[in-house]
Amino acid sequence: MAKLTMAQALNQALGQALEADERVIVLGEDVGRDGGVFRITDGLIDRFGAERVIDTPLAESGIVGTSVGLAMGGMRPVAEIQFFGFIYETMDQIASQAARVRFRSMGRFSAPLVIRTPYGGGVKAPEIHSDSLEALFVHTPGIKVVTPSNPYDAKGLLLAAIDDPDPVLFLEPMRLYRAFRDEVPEEPYRVPLGVANVVRAGRDITLIGWGASMPVVLQAADELVARHDVVPEVVDLRTLSPLDESTIIQSVQRTQRAVVVHEAVRSAGLGAEVAALIQERALLYLEAPVGRVSGYDTPYPMTMFEDLWLPDATQVVSAALAALRF
Amino acid sequence: MPMQAGSMEEQFPLIQRLNEDGELVGELGIVDEQGLVDVYRSMVMLRRFDERAWNLQRQGVIGTYAPFKGQEAAQLGAAYGLGARDWLVPTYRDWAACWARGVPLEHGLFFAKGHPRMGAVPEEARVFPAQVVIAAQTLHGVGLAWSLKLRREAAAALVTFGDGAASQGDTHEAMNFGSVFGVPLIFFCENNHWAISVPLERQMRSETVAQRALAYGMEGFRVDGNDYVAVVNLVHDLAERARRGEGPFLVEAVTYRLGAHTTADDPTKYRASDEEQRWEQRDPIRRLERFLLGRGLLDDAGIAEAEEAALQEVEATLERFRQALEEDPAVLFDHVYAELTPQLAAQRDRFVARAKEVEH
Ligand SMILES: Cc1ncc(C[n+]2csc(CCOP(=O)(O)OP(=O)(O)O)c2C)c(N)n1
């Protein structure tokens, strides 16, 4: 089996989707000749032509708005927003249009499109290029939100997202595009949406993360085992909307403690939703309050200080130990 | 009746005063020969700065940097065409224009470094922080100019944007608002022919950017953006008219991005080098140099001296940049709101404690 980076796995998935279904098109800024600023669409224009791999004019609302129409017209657009921070440009077309077409028409129409976008910090990118805004879209009924944390999931989740009958926001942690390789089967496969992954079975505490935060969570898990004799269970949510509630609850019922980790700002982040869910459904199992490790309530910092701002494994370990000693 | 294709370049002819060979084909207008020597020296310094910034990224000293190489004449023409009380609303690529309006060059490095001070423009400079969200600033430019009008201030504003930015809805809304409210603004499009990898002809089907002025009921102009003399005269004239209430105006400065989009970009992926070479011939600095040499206003010694002075200025800029690196990280919390909220105050304390731990 080939060992691929996440960037290569995504590229392979897009190629296979374009190959399998003529309705699939890829569009966005610089996705054609340039192969995307992160090279995720590299080579696709040569294989599938400029009619299916499309360099659009520079306008995010245009990209998503026309994708909504394309999808309603029977196509399967896979749109790229160059960086997640620019999603605001097309907020109306996502939240009030794509996400509501099915609802508005009582199912007569739907908008099965995928919006791919790199997100997350840690790469010293300019302002507005590192934000984690997933909570805005988890808070938007009608659109699914997915984020892989490794090459294997990236390919399988993207193919599942393209198959999905509803609009899907597909968040690609840019720090992980080329961070490591995984065995990735050549043939197309799906990782189902809505199913979290128990990355490591454990007994003492449940660490919950997703996407860009997973390496931090895993590093913390290693440290807890090696230095503190604590065996955490690690859950990678993978799909943020709809949440896989039962995997979260079952895990916490066993471990009786949980810490949620995200890069996004703290207040009203997805961590708050997960914590609320746990206290609703597993209160009597809990031995400690659900911990949150997150960014601070500031705009994503100027990158000179981003390493200080971003959650790291030490903070996750401290939060876990605090829960254990509660 | 539909516009006849082919007529727009005639309707918006390229305004030029100093041609590619450095020959004067129009009037010097508001500039004098000695002033042009200063502008030449500034351009040389800015070019050296730009190259140095590129290298600093390669050395890992700063992050992503967007070079302005090739656009010096357009930017200085725009900046020096404005009056002392006029405003500039720039993008991430406009460090030459910003510098000419009183923003020290190290702000370009701050921007690429992700230094909190990047947008902390000096009090006396009438310049907005550099905008990175494509086209957002076009609307700010309109609003700013509108405020000047409402407050009866005899000043104008100039907002820059790229050819790619011309595709954004914001730009179209800005032009419409601007003309509906008759604001004293110059929409200054630095048409450098590329938006990252997307060439002008795939960005738009219209022959020129300038012709869009027609649709919004304003006057549009197409000027050779590598000709400092043409740009500065045009902007000077339009700023004056804008202050008299005749704005807004649209200027398309036809130029070329001689470098990569940013330090993260590889233009060999998408554009031919012969195109780059053709535009090297039209280099704004070379053109001015030829003119000055021809007039006897510059000689080899003068060129060497300009290079020497440029080097010193760039070094001084770097020194100021380095000194600014001492910044306290907790400043991240201090300007989210006018006053620190209780939540942020608590978070700030935790952040400071952690920063100390990390240090040790
Ligand atoms: C809203 C938004 N979308 C995308 C980007 C990413 N991006 C940065 S520069 C750029 C191209 C801009 O081209 P143009 O407006 O012609 O200006 P230039 O960079 O050539 O000066 C793009 C797509 C961005 N910064 N903001």
Image (cartoon, coloured by chain):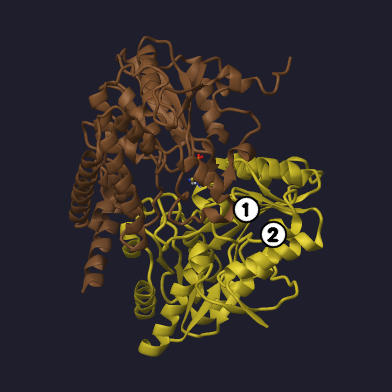
Chain colours: A yellow, B brown
Which amino acid, mark 2?
Answer: Leu
The CA span between labels 2 and 1 is 9 Å
Q: Is residue B59 left or right of residue A60?
A: left
Which amino acid, mark 1?
Answer: Val
Relative to B329, say whether A288 is above or below.
below
Please tell me which residue is depicted at 22% across the width and 37% down the height of the picture. Answer: B122
The quarter holding residue B105 reads top left
Please tell me which residue is depicted at 79% across the width and 46% down the height of the picture. Answer: A107
Relative to B73, say whether B27 is above or below.
above
Q: According to the image, label 2 marks what residue? A: A44
Q: Is residue A150 left or right of residue A99?
A: left
For the residue pair A62 and A255, the one nearer the viewer reads as A62
For the C terminus of chain A, the image quarter is: bottom left
Q: Tag 2's secondary structure?
A: helix
Whether residues under marks 2 and 1 lie with C-beta atoms below 8 angstroms apart, the answer is yes
Q: Residues within 10 Å of mark 1 (few under 14, many from 20)?
A: many
Q: What is the chain letter for disc 1?
A: A
Please tell me which residue is depicted at 25% across the width and 22% down the height of the picture. Answer: B84
Residue A31 is marked as 1
Relative to A233, say whether A239 is above or below.
above
Residue B96, how many percent across, how many down? 33, 38
Residue B331, how many percent across, how many down? 24, 52
